Amino acid sequence: MTFAYEYYCMAASSVPPLAVPRMKLKDLTWANKAKFNELMEKHSFVVLTDIGKLKNLYLQLRDAMESLFQENDQAKDACTSSYIYRNETKTPMWYAGYERSRVRECFRVHTGELERLKWPSSTFESAWLTLMKKCQAICDKSLSLTLGYTVEPASAQKEAKADLSVCYGLHYPNKEGTGQSDQENVFEHVDPSLYVIEPVTDVRGLDVFDQASQQWICAEDVCVPHEELVLFCGKALQRATENRVPGTLHRVTRYESTMNIPRYCFIYEQKYESFFP
């Protein structure tokens, strides 16, 4: 069994190459628990490769998301639910479904309350749920390996009304004046979640901070678009592991090369009520 470290050379010769942690998706098993934990503890993220049919599932949803975000405002607003998501502190956060702001458009889903959503179409719903369930399974397995015992899957958490997990389909226009700063669509932060998974898209933007090298890495520069997943962690996982696995600092950057090129991405954030004080 081998686990790859691929070296990504930065442009400046004075900066050492970065070792990008990679595992094949099929190797996310109990037999490889020690290696998985070693990588997460060292880097706080892992790139999952050889994702098989997940590539086509992601591309199907990406096409559906792009179609939604290209609709007129009236059609998009019709996909906004009256249901308000309340987070782990019971704070009301957002209306489920479609929402837009200066920074981005998004379609938001509370995975524990799917019946309250207004889906754009049955095709969109089917593509979303299929990919979401695959991401849930990956995060559930990752959480179990990290904690050393089998964590109840998302389906069981839902039955107990304890699944606070969320999914986002996002569209960043990457136009001047649309970010939180001139260079960043979203400032650097650590999510409140357990595990977070994001399929690598085809437009640069996701930067993760590598704990091992203390350097920023642009995921799209070191990964294969649509064929790899970035798995990283949040504050709840750091707390659950007593800081053994650090939360992943990340940001969404608007690079000069991506100006006026729209960026579409999908994110699943694992949040189970029992892991929040």
Image (tube, rainbow, N blue to C red):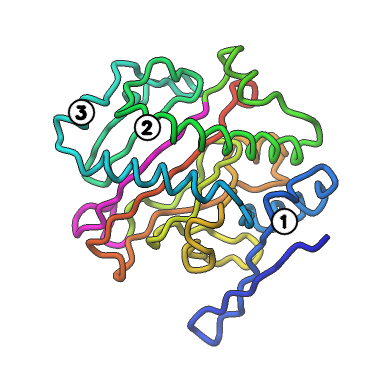
Q: Earlier in the sequence, mark 2 or mark 3?
A: 3
Compared with 12, 124 (above or below) is: above
Residue flagged by tag 1: what amino acid is it?
Leu
Looking at the rendered structure, which numbered label has been put on residue 86?
none
User: Residue 211, percent across and down?
Assistant: 62, 60
Q: CB under 8 Å between callouts 3 and 1? A: no
**Closer to the camera: disc 3 or disc 1?**
3
Is 159 displayed left or right of 79 in the figure?
A: right
User: Residue 90, percent across and down?
Assistant: 46, 18
Give the magenta range: 165-183
**Residue identifier under label 2:** 123
**Closer to the camera: disc 2 or disc 3?**
2
Q: CB under 8 Å between callouts 2 and 3? A: no
Count the marks.
Answer: 3
Residue 258 position by quadrant = bottom left
Q: Secondary structure at mark 1?
A: helix
Q: CA distance from mark 1 to mark 2?
A: 37 Å
Residue at 56% from the left image edge and 13% from the top image edge: 161
Compared with 161, 225 (above or below) is: below
Question: Which quadrant would the N terminus be assigned to in this image?
Answer: bottom right
Residue at 35% from the left image edge and 50% from the top image edge: 264
Residue at 61% from the left image edge and 52% from the top image edge: 51
